[in-house]
Image (cartoon, grey):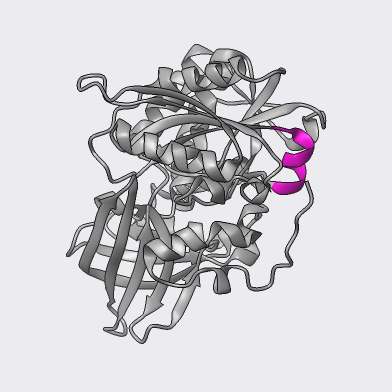
Amino acid sequence: MRELTMADVKAAVRGGAVFACGGGGWVDHGLEIGGAAVGIGRPKLASVDELPDDAIIITATAIGAPAGDTWEMWGIDYIKAVQLLMENYDGKIYGIMTPQNGMSSTINGWLPAAALGLVVVDATGDIRAHPTGKMGSMGLASLTDYQTIQVVVGGRRDNGSYLELVVKGTPAKTSNILRTASDMSGGFIASARHPIPASYVKKHAAIKGISIALDLGYAMIEAEAIGPEAIMETVCQKTNGRILGRGRVVKKDVHYSGAFDIGTITLEDETSGKTLTMHVMNEYMAVDNAKGKRLTTYPDVITTFELATGLPISVGFVKEGMELALFAIDKEYLPLSSSVKDPTVYPEVEQALGIPLAKYALKGFKEKRSK
């Protein structure tokens, strides 16, 4: 096992920001929660090979819309969510994983792991950030015979929006309840969910999701001394990624709705003079060119870099007139979980965005339904 340090926190935030795909939390929040984790204990990162098959693993995350500004979530909320799940689960919890990478999402489980003596599992429910809990559930969303426990804790203390909620049922139904709770709490809330055996994680998760983000983050930090272009070139080389275009943001039309940030961001490519449209549901989910041709679609990684800094920038901080580079990693270069191959996770996102996703996302996959 690898003992996680403050240097790892910084690398996780930096590398996780690429896989955040415009969402995935906030840099400051990631540094704050990660710093608290390595300050109160010695969280350890365990590979899946180090886990007994019957060890119970849970998922720790935050639920909501990253661009929102009315939420309040403390480090203790992450710990309390895991404690409540442990109290309501008839068994022993061994480790914690995150459903996705991100600016703070990569570090989701580090603080409760350090506080409660659990290990951080080097696997993710999805290598990149995504808008719904079902997309990071490792295929659990379509299982009607799996009864999960989901917990949320957090909210504004000053206006009575603080909530603690424990729900049991199928992942598909309970996930929708948690999204409503997040909206009621102010738009973002800490969560713990889905106790499952390590044998399931080994078969259905995106393996090494955390160490991939760490390795990328260390490379980016090293490149920062050279300059913005060096950072972006390093990311391309390390990930087999590519720049789809670069230029000025000519329109941002993203609005908050039901704990989601939904809309589009339009970039005018400086080389062709033509527009690229990024479809947003918390994260970048697809990109179309000026003729409506699809260029990239989830589960591809889709990220914007601010040209002035060479660093990933989230949807909430993108402004009209800003100069950005649009970056993508094709799914063939990514470790993929069972969730992204599950047709049932796409319809609600397609309905919210008003565009097709599944026909692009599922291309090349064979449907799997083993538990």
Q: Position of residue 368 (x, y in %)?
A: 75, 59
- Vertical placement of residue 349 versus 151, above or below: below
Left or right: 52 as drawn, with respect to 97: right
Magenta-drawn stretch, dominant element (helix, strand or loop) = helix
Residue 126, x across and y down, in percent: 58, 49
Position of the N terminus, as image quadrant, is top right
Q: Compare residues 88 and 129 and report the one nearer the observer.
A: 88
Whether residue 88 is visible: yes
- Asked if one can make out residue 104 in the rendered structure from this viewpoint, the answer is no
Nearest the eye: 141 or 28:
141
Residue 167 in the image, given as x and y percentages of width and height: 53, 29
**Toward which corner of the image does residue 248 lie, by quadrant?**
bottom left
198 within the magenta span: yes
Front one among 160 and 106: 160
* Residue at point 36%, 87% (across, down): 291
Q: Which residue is painted at 20% across and 58% down in the image? A: 319
Figure disc tally: 0
Q: In the rendered view, tell whether residue 291 sits above or below residue 265.
A: below
39 to 345, vertically: above or below: above
Q: Which residues are magenta?
A: 196-204
8 in magenta: no
Farthest residue to the left: give it. Answer: 321
Q: Position of residue 194 (x, y in %)?
A: 62, 34
Identify the residue at horizontal 78%, vertical 30% (top origin): 51
Q: Quadrant of residue 327?
A: bottom left
**Which image quadrant is residue 53 in?**
top right
| Up/down of 270 relative to 278, above or below | below
Q: Residue at (52%, 38%) from the top-left corner?
A: 174
